[in-house]
Image (spheres, rainbow, N blue to C red):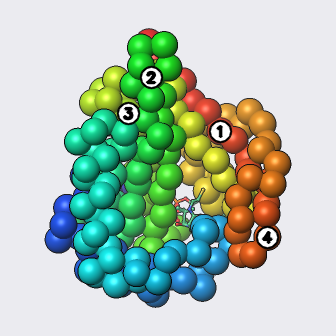
Amino acid sequence: MPGRTRIRLVEPADAAPLAAHRARDVELFRRWEPAQPPALLTAEGQAERIDRLLAGHRAGTVWPGVVLADGEVIGQVTVGGVLPQPHLRRGSLGYWITGTAQNRGHAGRAVGLALRVMAEELGLHRAEASTNLENLPSQRVLRRNGFSPYGVAHSAILLDGRWQDSLLWERILGD
Ligand SMILES: CC(C)(COP(=O)(O)OP(=O)(O)OC[C@H]1O[C@@H](n2cnc3c(N)ncnc32)[C@H](O)[C@@H]1OP(=O)(O)O)[C@@H](O)C(=O)NCCC(=O)NCCS
């Protein structure tokens, strides 16, 4: 049911569910995401991170969101690296959905909602993202939202103990 997915800015009260998901998903995410510092597997560590993210939001460099399904926090969607200068106006999307909620279309819909935030709230012109070359679910999410691959960054991210290439994605949002 498409209406079930929502996104909103992260809040201090999200620390506990985010930490619980992160702790449960360590093995599942090992292939796809850099290892989380141990502190982020605790509610206290997540609370400090949320404070930093909200400071970044006030400074205009990041839009840190959570993804909700039926009102429950199930993941995050973040617009990072925001460059608001009139000649750039771009930002980079990152996202994850906890294992128990995957493959129900939540990431696809959350990315669609985040693109609206980027265009309408942040006034951005260009959205970027990157995926592992083998992360087919993430690539599906981006393609479904109108992204195209435009290149490969070599040896770009240390994942699962190995420097790996990243596939680079872009979507033009409008004038
Ligand atoms: C990538 C991720 C965000 C997708 O979340 P999700 O809510 O399951 O995504 P959706 O349900 O919206 O879409 C998943 C798509 O992948 C497809 N898919 C699932 N498993 C697949 C597989 N093994 N091979 C190919 N496609 C696959 C689904 O069919 C669906 O495609 P469709 O839209 O054509 O039907 C989630 O798997 C995740 O958090 N992974 C770990 C962290 C991560 O990879 N983050 C992104 C880093 S770039």
Q: Is residue 125 above or below residue 16?
A: above
- Quadrant into which the N terminus falls: bottom left
Real-space Cα separation, disc 1 to disc 4, in angstroms: 22 Å
Q: Position of residue 2 (x, y in %)?
A: 35, 54
Q: Secondary structure at mark 4?
A: strand
Between discs 4 and 3, the one toward the N terminus: 3
Looking at this view, is 45 or 22 the one in front? 45
Label for residue 46?
none
SS at badge 1? strand
Q: Quadrant of ligand 1?
A: bottom right
Q: What is the C-alpha distance between the residues marked 4 and 3?
A: 32 Å
The disc labelled 1 sits on which kind of residue? Trp
- Mark found first going from the N terminus, 1 or 4: 4
**Does mark 2's beta carbon lie closer than 8 Å to ligand 1?**
no
Q: Is residue 21 visible?
A: no
* Residue holding disc 2: 89
Give whichever of discs 3 and 2 has the lower sequence position: 2
Dot 1 alpha-carbon crowd within 10 angstroms: few under 14, some 14 to 19, many 20 or more: many
Is 78 drawn above or below residue 150 in the view shown?
Answer: below
Label 2 SS: loop
